[in-house]
Image (tube, rainbow, N blue to C red):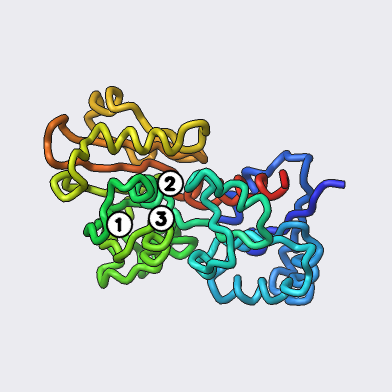
Amino acid sequence: MAPKIFIDGEHGTTGLQIRTRMAGRRDVELLSIPEAERRNATIREDMLNSADIAILCLPDDASKEAVQMVSANNNVRVIDTSTAYRVDPSWAYGFAEMDKEQADKIKSARFVANPGCYPTGAIGLIRPLRAAGLLPDGYPITVNAVSGYTGGGKQMIAQIEDQSRDDAISSPHFLYGLPLTHKHVPEMKIHGLLDRAPIFSPSVGKFAQGMIVQVPLHLDDLPSGATMESLHAALTAHYAGQDIVTVVPLADSSKLGRIDAVELAGKDTMKLFVFGTPGASQVNLVALLDNLGKGASGAAVQNMDLMLAS
């Protein structure tokens, strides 16, 4: 019998993309609430408790409510795509490539917190260097990023795609999170193994899907002997043996004149780059991904497949 999967919030942006990725699969059975019954709490609770894996594509409070609905049913495993549990130590963090043991933790977990899109890029760059001792305690990390507008959900999608709205957004690019209290900062700090919060400056571009995350570094403030080459080598060693996250060779990166934020749109992979001039004192670490791919829906399906393989 195929395992049953219920996407709670299947009509939202993340949920729809998960359904798209699972279209045509015969190894799982997708449970779905009829459109007319979407707000029927009884049916929702029944669906949650009938699933082998429930994927929650909901706001934080609604996700917490759903978890309570299945808390007594040990047969139901949960993947939550909200920010509600990403720094909860009792939940497995759903970034399989983050550490060598992380995929196994996800496989055996009952509760998995899907990472945020920005943190996936930032942690993907920072954590291997912290683990290798190349980023010292107290280093002032900054994270600058641009995302496709689908990361803002249906509200922002409508504001950008329907210019007849009173609240339409016409800007081709804008910053937000200006008070520096973005909800992804704790996630970056904890899973990035940082001892102080990074300064995070997110922005949105007028493209649907894609993302660039940048972490610039001063080599003079790193441990003695740190170079562009040694940072690249640490990233390459960390991600060796898997094909979801790839580290672009320095020789290839040096030939690039620009990075296109939409290069990986529609894909569930991530590319990491180390840019700079050999012998110089500055480098720029860059992650390229789809905010709805490895940054959301693609990661959720990857985590689901790991859990089903346990």
Which dot marks residue 287? none
| Above or below, 177 relative to 285 | below
Q: Nearer the viewer, residue 246 or 158?
A: 246
Which dot marks residue 203? 1
Q: Is residue 21 visible?
A: yes
| Type of the residue with mark 1 | Ser
Residue at the disc numbered 2: 209
Q: Is residue 252 left or right of residue 276?
A: right
Rendered location of residue 300, percent (x, y): 59, 51
Rendered location of residue 77, percent (x, y): 71, 60
Q: Is residue 244 left or right of residue 263?
A: right
Residue positioned most to the right: 1
Pointers 2 and 3 in contact (C-beta within 8 Å): no
Rendered location of residue 297, percent (x, y): 56, 50
Helix, strand, or loop for circle 2? loop
Which picture quadrant has residue 194?
Answer: bottom left
Residue at the image point whose x is 30% and y is 24% from the top? 252
**Spatial CA span between label 2 and label 3:** 16 Å
Helix, strand, or loop for circle 1? strand
Q: Is residue 170 left or right of residue 262?
A: left
Q: Nearer the viewer, residue 198 or 138?
A: 138
Which dot marks residue 119? 3
